[in-house]
Image (cartoon, rainbow, N blue to C red):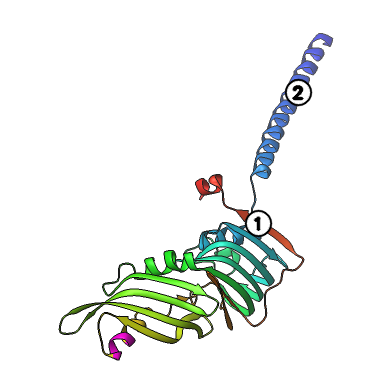
């Protein structure tokens, strides 16, 4: 009986050890899965918003400040952007600074969907943008009017007094005229989001043409700059000319504030990832 009892006890011990080893292995397995899941990167809503701006503007640099992370309804109390070398509507903007108050975006739960991230409501926007003569020529005129059947060889030069623009215009009346048109002009802001030629004088070389032809030629390139499709509703109020550049701005200039900071800078690695 004693020998039988000892064998039975040893069996119970081995059985208990087996279950202990089984639960230990199971615990290690579950813990390793939990650690692996926790090691996966989790992006904040601010990081996702920054990525959206990178996709939207194709910038060289972005410095973004948020007063708060977007909440479940997409509300940001205040947002500041300082962007270098961004693309808006096919035009390179050398420098863009923006401060928006009371921004309501699409709810973050829909950001991954098609057309998911958009500004639904913005209480106020302050903006300052600088555009160079080089970018206006290369990015706007060549891309927007380079394939036009009527305008060719458009060029713009900026001075503190305004702009000088010239181009060849093909007028078709009874026959085709290749007219060199030179425009000396100021700019004006239309609907607080577009830049138009204004108070311009025309000079037509080599041939006399009716006024309606030159007026039609100018109407073909209006507006010269259209920011109406920008994600935030801009309220531009002033244009200033410098040698080789111009600036457009709202009545109040945007200023940074203390908050949650996100940054992006384009390099070879980010280009590959994008």
Secondary structure of residue under mark 2: helix
The residue pinned by badge 1 equals 263
Magenta span: predominant SS is: helix
Measured along the vertical axis of the image, is residue 241 above or below residue 263? below
Left-right relation of 3 to 246: right
Please identify the quarter of the rendering in which residue 220 is found: bottom left
Left-right relation of 1 to 264: right
Q: Which residues are magenta?
A: 211-215
Measured along the vertical axis of the image, is residue 101 above or below residue 44? below
- Please tell me which residue lies in front, 64 or 76: 64
Q: Position of residue 271 (x, y in %)?
A: 51, 49
Report the residue at 68% width, 74% height from top. Answer: 254
Secondary structure of residue under mark 1: strand
Label 2 Cα neighbours within 10 Å, binned few <14 / some 14-19 / many ≥20: few
Q: Position of residue 19 (x, y in %)?
A: 72, 27
Observer-side mark, 2 or 1, equals 1
Q: Position of residue 12 (x, y in %)?
A: 77, 21
Please identify the quarter of the rendering in which residue 100 is found: bottom right
The residue pinned by badge 2 equals 17
Give the CA separation, mark 2 to mark 1.
55 Å
> Which quarter shows the N terminus?
top right
């Amino acid at each position: 009986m004693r020998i039988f009892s000892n064998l039975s006890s040893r069996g119970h011990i081995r059985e208990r050890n087996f279950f202990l080893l089984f639960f230990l292995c199971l615990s290690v397995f579950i813990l390793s899965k939990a650690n692996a899941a926790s090691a996966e990167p989790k992006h904040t809503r601010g990081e996702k918003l920054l990525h959206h701006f990178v996709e939207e503007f194709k910038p060289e640099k972005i410095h973004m400040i948020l007063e708060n992370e977007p909440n479940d309804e997409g509300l940001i109390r205040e947002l500041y952007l300082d962007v270098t070398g961004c693309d808006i509507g096919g035009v390179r903007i050398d420098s863009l600074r923006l401060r928006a108050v009371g921004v309501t975006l699409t709810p973050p739960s829909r950001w991954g969907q098609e057309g998911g991230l958009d500004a639904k409501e913005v209480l106020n926007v302050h903006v300052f943008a600088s555009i160079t003569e080089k970018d206006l020529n290369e990015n706007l005129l060549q891309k927007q009017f380079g394939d036009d059947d009527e305008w060719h060889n458009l060029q713009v030069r900026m001075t503190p007094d305004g702009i000088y623009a010239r181009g060849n215009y093909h007028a078709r009346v009874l026959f085709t005229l290749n007219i060199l048109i030179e425009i000396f002009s100021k700019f004006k802001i239309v609907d607080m989001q577009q830049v138009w030629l204004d108070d311009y004088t025309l000079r037509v070389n080599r041939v006399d043409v009716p006024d309606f032809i030159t007026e039609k030629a100018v109407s073909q390139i209006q507006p010269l700059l259209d920011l109406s499709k920008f994600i935030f509703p801009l309220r531009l109020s002033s244009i200033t000319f410098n040698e080789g550049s111009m600036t457009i701005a709202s009545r109040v200039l945007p200023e940074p504030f203390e908050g949650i900071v996100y940054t992006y800078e384009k390099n070879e690695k980010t280009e590959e990832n994008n």
